[in-house]
Image (cartoon, rainbow, N blue to C red):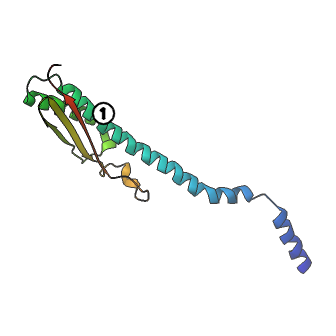
């Protein structure tokens, strides 16, 4: 009987039939977390690029205005339209803070502050070290003729 148990243990040590399953069980969680982190970070950077694009488009639209009030309205309207194109990626309950001001003579500034913490996709990133959920970007352009 003892001899039989010894042969069985020796056979299990030499056998490799379940080795792939054990390796998969050990490595799969790490690989899945890595893939999940890549997806979450790509969504964050897409939101960041969306805020940048909206700010630049708002500043570009502001250049066509004749007065400061018209420039401000054009910038806010264009930036809001661009951000709306990103849909739920930016968060459903978040409202961007879009400011269009004249910081000094001959310049026009468009600034967007957007809190994406309400984004349904980023709510699953609790275990990742994420950058700030408040994304801000500003663009200053020259207005008037050259």
The quarter of the image holding the C terminus is: top left
Toward the bottom, the furthest residue is 2
Toward the right, the furthest residue is 3
Note whether 114 is above or below 68 in the view shown: below
Q: Residue at x 9, y 29 (%)?
A: 68
The quarter of the image holding the N terminus is: bottom right
Side of 63 relative to 86 (left or right): left
The x and y percentages for residue 17 are 78, 57
Note whether 107 is above or below 126 in the view shown: above
Q: Residue at x 57, y 52 (%)?
A: 31
Residues 85 and 37: in front is: 37
- Number of callouts in the render? 1
Note whether 95 is above or below 24 in the view shown: above
User: Does residue 86 appear in the picture of this structure?
Assistant: no
Q: Quadrant of residue 48?
A: top left
> What kind of element bears circle 1?
helix
Mark 1 residue crowding within 10 angstroms, few (<14) / some (14–19) / many (20+): some
Q: What residue sits right under mark 1 in the picture?
A: 53
Residues 127 and 121: in front is: 127
The x and y percentages for residue 60 are 23, 26
User: Does residue 32 appear in the picture of this structure?
Assistant: yes
Q: Residue at x 43, y 47 (%)?
A: 41
């Amino acid at each position: 009987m003892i001899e039989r148990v010894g042969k069985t243990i020796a056979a299990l040590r030499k056998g490799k039939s379940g080795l792939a399953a054990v390796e998969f069980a050990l490595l799969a969680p790490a690989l899945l977390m890595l893939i999940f982190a890549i997806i979450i970070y790509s969504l964050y950077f897409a939101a960041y690029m969306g805020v940048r694009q909206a700010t630049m488009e708002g500043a570009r639209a502001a250049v066509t205005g004749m007065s400061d009030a018209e420039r401000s309205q054009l910038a806010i309207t264009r930036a809001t339209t661009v951000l709306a194109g990103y849909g739920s990626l930016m968060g459903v309950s978040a409202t961007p803070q879009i400011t269009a001001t004249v910081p000094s003579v001959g310049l026009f500034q468009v600034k967007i502050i957007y809190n994406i913490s309400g984004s349904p996709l980023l709510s699953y990133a609790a275990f990742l070290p994420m950058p700030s959920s408040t994304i801000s970007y500003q663009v200053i352009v020259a207005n008037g003729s050259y």
